[in-house]
Amino acid sequence: MRSSPQILLINPNTSRDTTDTMVAIARTCVPADVAVQGATASRGPSVITTAQALAAAAAAVIEIGLRSASEVSGIVVGAFGDPGLEALRENR
């Protein structure tokens, strides 16, 4: 059993710098006992600016989310349009 809540913030694009920035912001918004960890897509678009890029990003989000779901209290998809979110909800 987890000792404290853990939130996984998935960055659907491949920018580790963006992931680091999002995690830093998220950490300012949660109680001190909540851990926020980041995960960056290893493949897919470097930025998400089109519907095609949004769709392409979903596969990495699903892979990361399914792999990590049992280890965290919650998952945040850090992108407009929430690529892969519905599939993660269906597989919880």
Image (spheres, grey):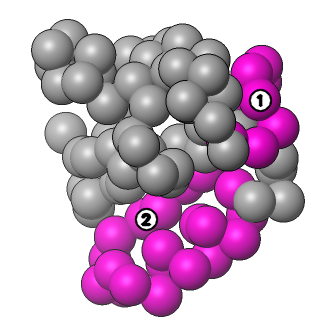
Q: To which quarter of the image does residue 3 belong?
A: bottom left
Residue 19 placement (x, y as % from top left): 70, 56
Horizontally, is 59 left or right of 20 in the view?
A: left
In terms of sequence position, does the residue under pointer 2 or pointer 1 come before the other? 2
Horizontally, is 91 left or right of 17 in the view?
A: left
- Amino acid carrying mark 2 in the image: Ala
Tags 2 and 1 in contact by the CB under 8 Å rule?
no
Residue 91 badge: none
Residue 6 seen anywhere in this rendered image of the structure: yes
Q: Residue at x 15, y 14 (%)?
A: 90
The magenta segment:
19-48
Q: Residue at x 27, y 46 (%)?
A: 74
Q: Which structural element holds mark 2? A: strand
- Compared with 39, 37 (above or below) is below
Which one is in front, 78 or 28?
A: 78
Which one is in front, 84 or 9?
A: 84
Q: Quadrant of the N terminus?
A: top left
Residue 62 placement (x, y as % from top left): 44, 18
State the residue position of label 2.
35
- Amino acid carrying mark 1 in the image: Pro
State the residue position of label 1.
45
How far apart are the alpha carbons under marks 2 and 1? Answer: 27 Å
Q: Which structural element holds mark 1? A: loop
Q: Quadrant of the C terminus?
A: top left
Residue 63 placement (x, y as % from top left): 51, 14
Q: To which quarter of the image does residue 60 belong?
A: top right
Q: Which residue is drawn at 53% across and 43% down?
A: 10
